[in-house]
Image: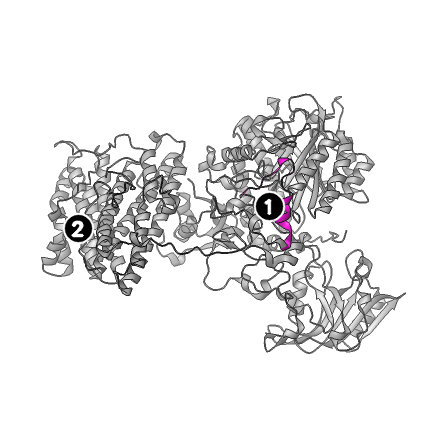
């Protein structure tokens, strides 16, 4: 399989895929000419409105009259004004009747058109039915360059095309390029008119001429692009059936509320209390909304959906979407502030950071153990449902464990920024930091990924704003938030320290939310499924060391030592103060992969990884790394790999040679990567 | 959970990202990765975007309501889910007062300026033509005063259409769905009048009257119900197209009072083969820019193009409800008088709790084996009524049909993108009269 990703092709095909693609630069929908009809985010005006007065004194309508029909029509003549033309035009407003038989359309334009190869003088014709109506007719007019132009205006025949007999057509076509006006009437009714003049100067050096447009003229046909315009369908089960009801308006707005990224209480606000009275839409709905108890004034009333007419007239009163919910006004929430008494002094911030480092470490190990407890294949399974699901679940949990390693690093980075030593310890019992009994009571434990254990993972990663402080203890997120606010509000930190620290703490808080989501997804995937179908049967809670002579004993020792090596590698990473800290951490992952090999081998042989916390002296390979001599590579080998060699040999002798080889490869790769960065 | 589904088309290899129904053209390596369940590198960011989660839809107001104006029928189709419209009880008709009250309360909760649909179902709604006429006029008038864009729909067997009915269906914005099961032989085998006589001629005469009326209803479609005894689908489709309707399509019988009319696994295989044969004809016609209004296929193309993704199969109990003759409110017209679908009454109003409860229970991520099926957000879990009556027996068929439609979509959208982008100018025959 090709490793060269530049050979890879991934092209979005359907609309959701295209919409999901992030491309650098402005999207095509912000080009002025994309501003058609409505719902084109980012537009400030609809360019068709710019060109509607391209002929002095006349105003055309380029928007389809019946938008839902998606049909082609030639531009419609809306109004005639001698005053705006600055001369007496040979037709008048009375010719532009409102009734169908008087409606006049633009059928042809003569003039100079900009083309790829330069200006070209020619006649462009519009027909009602050949597809040049609507947007494409506007494009033709838009390409007209300043200079002499001429127009052919006439009525529309019942069958769709221009209502002109052959003789009149010839006459009109001839007049088009003569530079003269020509008007034919029959019984006071306009048959056709050819008008000549100069194309209006609505752009002066690329700037819109303010004399020609009134307020709201250019944005008339835009809706607020932030509006969710959903409406529901009736019986519309299409995946196998022809839907029972056929009257659904496929072009109409669709109600896909569940497409919203964020919902829940407070997202859809009680519109009645906040909507502008000017539209009369929702206020009316609320006032008349309870005849016979059909509907009650409830916050989840999904707002209103505007129709085309309302979009044209009232687009500027549509509600924008803030924080994924429609709202007529945006009140920025005042920045959260701690009461002065709660602002922690520098020493306490440091103490808590040190404690949180041990918590991150503890969680990383709990997640890892849970990961190993899932009965998942190590390589991607085929299409069988259960292995595929278990693989996904195990992978999700592992990904969070790996993230925790990063958090572990960030907290240590903060400690170093503040001039303090690193913290590689692991939490035993969760502390009541404030002594107010509002804390998560938990003892570090290795447990399989049972439903209650998963609930605990979700709880501990839960965003603090979802927690009622009267009912539940402070979360990890809450602890970091307290530190964040203390650093921001307090006076114990310099500006430089503040900038750096706040950034890192925010990163940790944001990722915590991601962990919460990932664990919640796992819960969704497992809901209603018996634990036996995803858990390994033999994985105990808080495993105890195996007796000597057990087939998994050697692997158990190797796994413990590999865990110790992970911590040693992290110790070295944390001591590095250069811009490659992230890359160093990447390199340290190889120690994690080696641990992964060992852990799976223990499990395969009937044991479980113990994750025994090394004695403090052993914990820090830093000193041996610092005192070792030679090249960085030599020093790394001495401090990280040498202690592993004996146990890896034991592993080989016990018959797990392939595992030992794989672990050795990971270590070699780690040392190579780390040395390269030093 | 299955996050992606690789498939092939004549255009090449593709991947459907299940969430968001996003379709990508991919290279062979990426396809091979996807085929073993691995997310190709180029899609790793995309696969993290979540479009649908397990949150249930919280019902707002209704936008579509159907009235079961006649819970009884002049026909006795062997497969009818409605038990000849009686839904297991005795035949009865909705009163004019009830019809008006339902329409009034429905329209009162639609905010002005919005679209709404009022449908007539049964049974055979034209058995109660008086209510159909009176309620339509009443509702159209009320909607106009409240600035609601109201459209109507009626599903009928077409055997009872009188001239004044046809005038009504043309005067108001009606979509008319007529049930006809293909040509005479197939139709008569399973759709008979209650006296046992053939209904075919009477239905065809009704269709002819509708399509040749001075003011033709804005949309006339045919819906063929397919049982294991039905004939070949392509032939049925041609028989139906020959009647000059705007579109025609099929619905298989999954739940029926008569077990011999229900599909079993082997029947589904045959049905899928027939559907694909029709779909291939549609692909051929579209490639030649000819109309081929096979509605199952056209709708599927549109939904797939748009990337439709929903955790429900339809709007039942969400934006749609159906009223029984006595004014009971049910989530679906197929489940009149079924307590599992009861969501209040016209008299007392919609029962939000019941609606919410229904929508929570019916969310596709609450269903097995839907939760892990790649088609879950295209299918939404299958027609509620069929699933509750019979379980999910047609999943392989649905996946097979969707697989075909996905492949056809990828093929057509690469060869004739303007069918999707500029449908108004796509067909060779542009004889649609826009200024009716």
x and y percent of residue A202 in the render? 65, 74
x and y percent of residue B212 in the render? 80, 42
SS class, disc 1 = loop
Vertically, is B376 above or below A513?
Answer: above
Residue A231, which numbered label? 1
Report how many numbered discs are placed on residues in the image: 2
* Residue in the picture at 15% in, 60% down: A632
x and y percent of residue A14 in the render? 53, 51
Of labels 2 and 1, the one closer to you:
1
Q: Chain of mark 2?
A: A
Magenta region, residue range: A278-298
SS class, disc 2 = helix
Is A297 magenta? The answer is yes
Q: Are marks 2 and 1 in contact (CB under 8 Å)?
A: no
| Mark 1 Cα-neighbour bin, 10 Å: few <14, some 14–19, many ≥20 | many
Residue A568, which numbered label? 2
x and y percent of residue A308 in the render? 65, 54
* Residue in the picture at 23% in, 60% down: A417
| Residue A256 in sight in this render | yes
Is A584 magenta? The answer is no
Badges 2 and 1, same chain: yes
């Amino acid at each position: 399989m090709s490793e060269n990703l530049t050979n890879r092709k991934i092209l979005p095909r359907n609309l959701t895929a295209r919409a999901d693609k992030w491309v650098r630069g402005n999207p095509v929908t912000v080009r002025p000419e994309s501003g058609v009809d409505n719902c084109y985010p980012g537009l400030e005006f609809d360019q068709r409105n710019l060109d509607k007065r391209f002929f002095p004194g006349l105003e055309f309508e380029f928007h389809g009259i019946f938008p839902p029909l998606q049909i082609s029509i030639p531009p419609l003549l809306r109004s005639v004004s001698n005053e705006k033309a600055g001369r007496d035009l040979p037709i008048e407003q009375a010719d532009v009747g409102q009734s169908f038989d008087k409606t006049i359309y633009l059928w042809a334009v003569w003039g100079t058109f900009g083309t790829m190869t330069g200006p070209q003088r020619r006649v462009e014709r519009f027909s009602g039915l050949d597809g040049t109506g609507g947007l494409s007719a506007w494009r033709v007019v838009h390409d007209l360059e300043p200079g002499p132009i001429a127009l052919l205006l006439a009525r529309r025949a019942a069958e769709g095309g221009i209502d002109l007999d052959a003789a009149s057509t010839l006459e009109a076509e001839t007049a088009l390029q003569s530079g003269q006006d020509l008007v034919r009437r029959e019984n006071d009714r306009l048959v056709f008119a050819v008008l000549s003049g100069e194309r209006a100067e609505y752009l002066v050096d690329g700037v819109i001429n303010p004399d020609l447009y009134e307020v709201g003229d250019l944005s008339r046909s835009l809706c607020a692009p932030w509006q969710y315009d959903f409406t529901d369908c009736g019986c519309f089960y299409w995946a196998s059936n022809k839907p029972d009801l056929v009257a659904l308006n496929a072009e109409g707005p669709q109600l896909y509320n569940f497409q919203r990224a964020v919902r829940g209480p407070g997202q859809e606000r009680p519109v009645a209390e906040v909507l502008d009275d000017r539209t009369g839409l929702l206020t009316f709905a609320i006032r008349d909304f309870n005849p016979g108890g059909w509907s009650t004034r409830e916050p989840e009333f999904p707002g209103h959906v505007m129709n085309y007419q309302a979009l044209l007239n009232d687009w500027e009163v549509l509600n924008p979407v803030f924080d994924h919910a429609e709202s007529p006004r945006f009140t920025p929430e005042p920045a959260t502030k701690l009461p002065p008494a709660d602002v922690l002094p520098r020493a306490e911030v440091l103490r808590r950071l040190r404690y949180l480092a041990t918590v991150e470490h503890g969680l990383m190990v709990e997640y890892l153990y849970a990961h190993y407890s899932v009965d998942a294949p190590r390589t991607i399974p085929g299409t069988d449902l259960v292995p595929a699901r278990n693989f996904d679940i195990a992978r999700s949990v592992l990904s969070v464990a790996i993230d925790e390693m990063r958090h572990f690093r960030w907290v240590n980075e903060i400690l170093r920024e503040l001039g303090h030593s690193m913290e590689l310890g692991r939490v035993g019992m969760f502390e009541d930091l404030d002594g107010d009994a509002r804390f998560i009571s938990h003892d570090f434990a290795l447990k399989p990924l049972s439903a209650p254990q998963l609930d605990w993972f979700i709880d501990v990663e839960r965003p603090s704003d979802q927690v009622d402080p009267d009912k539940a203890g402070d979360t990890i997120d809450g602890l970091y938030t307290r530190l964040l606010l203390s650093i921001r509000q307090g006076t114990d930190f310099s500006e430089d320290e503040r900038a750096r620290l706040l950034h890192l703490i925010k990163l940790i808080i944001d990722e915590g939310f991601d962990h919460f989501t990932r664990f919640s997804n796992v819960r969704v995937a497992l809901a209603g499924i018996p634990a036996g179908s995803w858990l390994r049967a033999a994985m105990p809670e808080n495993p105890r060391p195996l007796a000597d002579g057990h087939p998994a004993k050697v692997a158990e020792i190797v796994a413990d030592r590999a865990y110790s090596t992970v911590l040693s590698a992290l110790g070295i990473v944390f001591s590095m103060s250069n811009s490659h800290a992230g890359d160093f951490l990447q390199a340290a992952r190889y120690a994690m992969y080696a641990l992964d090999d060992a852990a799976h081998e223990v499990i395969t042989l009937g044991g479980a990884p113990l994750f025994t916390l090394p004695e403090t002296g052993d914990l820090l390979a830093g000193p041996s790394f610092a005192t070792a001599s030679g090249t960085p590579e030599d020093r790394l080998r001495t401090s990280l790999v040498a202690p592993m060699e004996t146990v890896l040999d034991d592993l080989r002798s016990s018959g797990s040679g392939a595992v030992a080889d794989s672990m050795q490869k990971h270590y070699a790769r780690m040392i190579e990567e780390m040395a390269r960065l030093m | 959970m299955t996050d992606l589904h690789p498939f092939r088309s004549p255009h090449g290899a593709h991947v459907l990202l299940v969430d968001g129904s996003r379709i990508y053209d991919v290279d062979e390596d990426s396809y091979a990765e996807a085929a073993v369940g691995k997310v190709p590198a180029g899609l790793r960011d995309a696969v993290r975007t979540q479009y649908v989660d397990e949150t249930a839809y919280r019902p707002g107001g209704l936008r579509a309501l159907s009235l079961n104006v006649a819970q009884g029928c002049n026909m006795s189709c062997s497969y009818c889910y409605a038990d000849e419209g009686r839904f297991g009880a005795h035949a009865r008709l909705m009163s004019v007062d009830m019809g008006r009250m339902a329409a009034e309360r429905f329209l009162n909760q639609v905010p002005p300026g919005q679209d709404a649909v009022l449908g007539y179902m049964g049974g055979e709604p034209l058995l109660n033509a008086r209510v159909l006429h009176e309620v339509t006029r009443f509702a159209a008038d009320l909607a106009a005063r409240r600035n609601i864009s109201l459209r109507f729909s009626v599903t009928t067997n077409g055997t009872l259409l009188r001239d004044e009915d046809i005038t009504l269906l043309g005067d108001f914005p009606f979509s008319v769905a007529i049930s006809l099961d293909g040509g005479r032989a197939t139709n008569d085998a399973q759709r008979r009048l209650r006296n046992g006589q053939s209904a075919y001629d009477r239905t065809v005469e009704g269709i002819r009257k509708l399509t040749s009326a001075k003011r033709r209803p804005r949309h006339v479609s045919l819906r063929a119900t397919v049982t294991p005894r039905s004939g070949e689908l392509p032939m049925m489709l041609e028989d139906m197209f020959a009647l000059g309707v705007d579109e025609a399509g099929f619905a298989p019988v999954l739940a029926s009072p008569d077990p011999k009319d229900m599909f079993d696994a082997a029947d589904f295989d045959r049905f899928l083969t027939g559907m694909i044969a029709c779909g291939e004809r549609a692909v051929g016609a579209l490639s030649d820019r000819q109309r081929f209004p096979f509605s199952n296929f056209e709708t599927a193309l549109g939904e797939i193009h748009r990337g439709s993704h929903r955790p429900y199969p339809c709007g039942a109990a969400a934006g749609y409800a159906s009223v029984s003759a006595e004014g009971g409110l049910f989530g679906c017209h197929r489940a009149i008088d079924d307590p599992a679908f009861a969501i209040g009454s016209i008299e007392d109003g919609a029962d939000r709790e019941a609606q919410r409860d229904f929508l929570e229970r019916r969310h596709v991520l609450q269903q097995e084996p839907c939760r892990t099926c790649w088609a879950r957000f295209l299918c939404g879990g299958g027609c509620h009524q069929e699933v509750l009556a019979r379980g999910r027996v047609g999943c392989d068929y649905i996946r097979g049909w969707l697989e075909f439609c996905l492949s056809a979509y990828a093929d057509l959208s690469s060869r004739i993108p303007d069918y999707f982008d500029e449908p108004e100018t796509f067909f060779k025959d542009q004889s649609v009269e826009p200024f009716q």
